[in-house]
Image: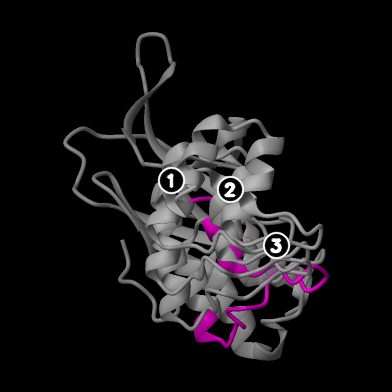
Amino acid sequence: MPATAPQEKLIHSDDGFLVYLTKQTTSTIGLRWDFSEPLEAPFDLFKVEKCYSCKRNQWEVVHWGTAWSVTVRNLEQNLCYSFRINALKQNEEDERFVYVRKSEIFKSFTLPDVPSTMAIFRAVKKNQPALIRKLLSIKPELVNVPVNGETFLYQAVRNNNLEVIDLLLEYGANVNLGVPSNWETPLHLAIYNKNIKIARHLLEHGADINAGNCIGMTAGHYAIDTNDLHTLRFVLTHGGSTESRDRCSWTLIFRAIYMHTSTEIVKYLLERKCRLKIRDKNRLMPLDYARLMDQQEVINLIKRRLKI
């Protein structure tokens, strides 16, 4: 096989094949391949297949022959495709083709026509960091433009993709901007999903632990809604306040009682010295809500703390 051309790029390597990208446009992907190790037995031809998503298992043959390269045309722009390459030999007895070497599934994508918010949105959704970098390097000002009401960073947090999150932050994504219409931040979403790793990463990049959404709910309120003590501990040990009030003037203890969270969460809030002699907009105190919700164990805990 000829040496690798300067414009070629190695995109896949496994025990069977080395695969190089030779062409990439809005509708075309060019591939060339070589064996990682020489075949011990002779072969007759290659079969190359593609599909839009390997999960659908709808493979289409795009090359059947002796050539060591193929240009796949008429593809949809800004989409990721899966490929696999097989070396075949024809059985002399029944003339059927048998596999002598198979590649692992690998991926490549077509380019967008022009950088646009929708192109970046699709690239973020499909977890394509190389394409995201290419698009934002041309138009970095698009990084904070919401699509379908959400920023790209918010979408990346939902996808749990730390690599894409880092890339968006590198290009200037606002760490406190998620859903502009309701002020929900990427940190709110990470906490609600109990994704501590991503939440910690956002905090390291300047996320506001006490930022409120449109009804005043902070990361602490979202942690209460998870009913997960580990998540609540994380928020409060990283600067979250037990006394942040939402639109109803509820602090975390109010919401914990109203949401019927575990007794362990109520105990933890009491250990953090949360205020109990406070009233919400209805002039009710946490003890009043415990009585309304008939939470006898919580009533006893609050009375013990108030010494009544």
Mark 3 lies on residue? 279
Q: Which residues are magenta?
A: 169-195
- For residue 76, which quarter of the picture? bottom right
Q: Earlier in the sequence, mark 1 or mark 2?
A: 2
Label 1 and label 3: CA atoms lie apart by: 19 Å
Compared with 278, 16 (above or below) is: above
Q: Earlier in the sequence, mark 2 or mark 3?
A: 2
Mark 1 lies on residue? 304
Residue at image x 66%, y 57%?
79
Asked if the stretch drawn in magenta spans residue 66, the answer is no
- For residue 278, which quarter of the picture? bottom right
Q: Do labels 1 and 2 touch, CB within 8 Å?
A: no
The picture places residue 176, in percent across and down from the top left corner, at: 62, 78
Mark 2 lies on residue? 256
Q: The disc labelled 3 sits on which kind of residue?
A: Arg
Q: The disc labelled 2 sits on which kind of residue?
A: Ala
Label 1 and label 2: CA atoms lie apart by: 18 Å
Which of the two residues, 302 or 198, is positioned nearer the viewer here? 302
Mark 1 is surrounded, within 10 Å at the Cα level, by few (under 14), some (14 to 19) or many (20 or more) other residues, namely few
Which of the two residues, 180 or 108, is positioned nearer the viewer here? 180
Q: Is there any visible trace of residue 263 in the rendered image?
A: yes
Q: Residue furthest front?
A: 308
Residue at image x 49%, y 62%?
274
Please say which color scheme the image uses: one colour
Label 2 and label 3: CA atoms lie apart by: 15 Å
Frontmost of labels 1 and 2 is: 1
Asked if the stretch drawn in magenta spans residue 182, the answer is yes
Residue at image x 63%, y 40%?
290
- For residue 243, which quarter of the picture? bottom right
